[in-house]
Amino acid sequence: DAEITQSPRHKITETGRQVTLACHQTWNHNNMFWYRQDLGHGLRLIHYSYGVHDTNKGEVSDGYSVSRSNTEDLPLTLESAASSQTSVYFCASSDPSGRNGGYEQYFGPGTRLTVT
Amino acid sequence: QKEVEQNSGPLSVPEGAIASLNCTYSDRVSQSFFWYRQYSGKSPELIMSIYSNGDKEDGRFTAQLNKASQYVSLLIRDSQPSDSATYLCAVATGYSSASKIIFGSGTRLSIRP
């Protein structure tokens, strides 16, 4: 079955280190998204991509970067991890050619990141 | 004003009753609306989509949309303990398929036996 996976599921890192979170989907969806979820803030969009070599900043993009070299993967990189980036990170994808414009997003299982 | 607003709860409903979850949004041109369910420690799961004014029913779930009032709701009939979760309202802004989704902060629902 097609799916969306994230790795690692849990990560502890130190302040200042570079960290990369992986997201892989097998639905062949063009659209992919990265969110962070914090208590009291709900889901906030970090970066998103509408296809290979396309990337866009979301509302909380500072300190994060993404690249899209193929349809299946959108890795999220924290250039220099900060304690404020301790959060749960979710990757999602959607098919823009789907019914009703394909806005429906499907989420991966999440990565819990702790920056000490 | 937040773009998508929900009462954070917790909303406590007895088993077998109807749970009513509400959401308001600020962007008048929004066209697509979604309800996600999120169990504690899990990822959001899409349970309902609604695109036109009125009601849409799927099993025990009914989504209601009123674009004039910028209001969308989710009714859960015959509530079960397994319905205890946080429910996220989400709204797609703009018209194109490249639209992003804005999420509310969620309403925590607790079904008491």
Image (cartoon, coloured by chain):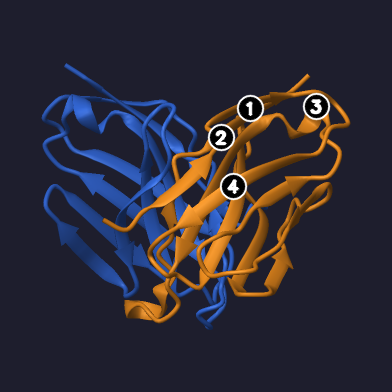
Q: Nearer the viewer, mark 4 or mark 3?
A: 4
What type is the residue that disc 1 sits on?
Answer: Lys
Label 2's element?
Answer: loop
What type is the residue that disc 3 sits on?
Answer: Ser
Q: Nearer the viewer, mark 3 or mark 1?
A: 1
Q: In the rendered image, what is the letter of the chain coloured orange?
A: A
The chain under label 3 reads A
Distance Cα–Cα, label 4 vs label 3:
20 Å
The residue under label 3 is A83
Label 1's element?
Answer: strand
The residue under label 1 is A11
The residue under label 4 is A22
Discs 3, 2: same chain = yes
Q: Colour of chain B?
A: blue
The residue under label 2 is A8
Distance Cα–Cα, label 1 vs label 2:
6 Å
Marks 4 and 1: CB-CB under 8 Å?
no
What type is the residue that disc 4 sits on?
Answer: Ala
Discs 4, 3: same chain = yes
In the rendered structure, the answer to whether residue B78 lies left or right of residue A102 reads: left
Of mark 4 and mark 3, the one earlier in the sequence is 4
Of mark 3 and mark 2, the one earlier in the sequence is 2
Marks 1 and 2: CB-CB under 8 Å?
yes
Distance Cα–Cα, label 3 vs label 2:
18 Å
Q: Residue at x 30, y 50 (%)?
A: B74
Marks 2 and 4: CB-CB under 8 Å?
yes
Q: Is residue A21 above or below residue B16?
A: below
Label 4's element?
Answer: strand
Q: Residues within 10 Å of mark 4 (few under 14, many from 20)?
A: some
Q: Is residue B81 above or below residue B56?
A: above
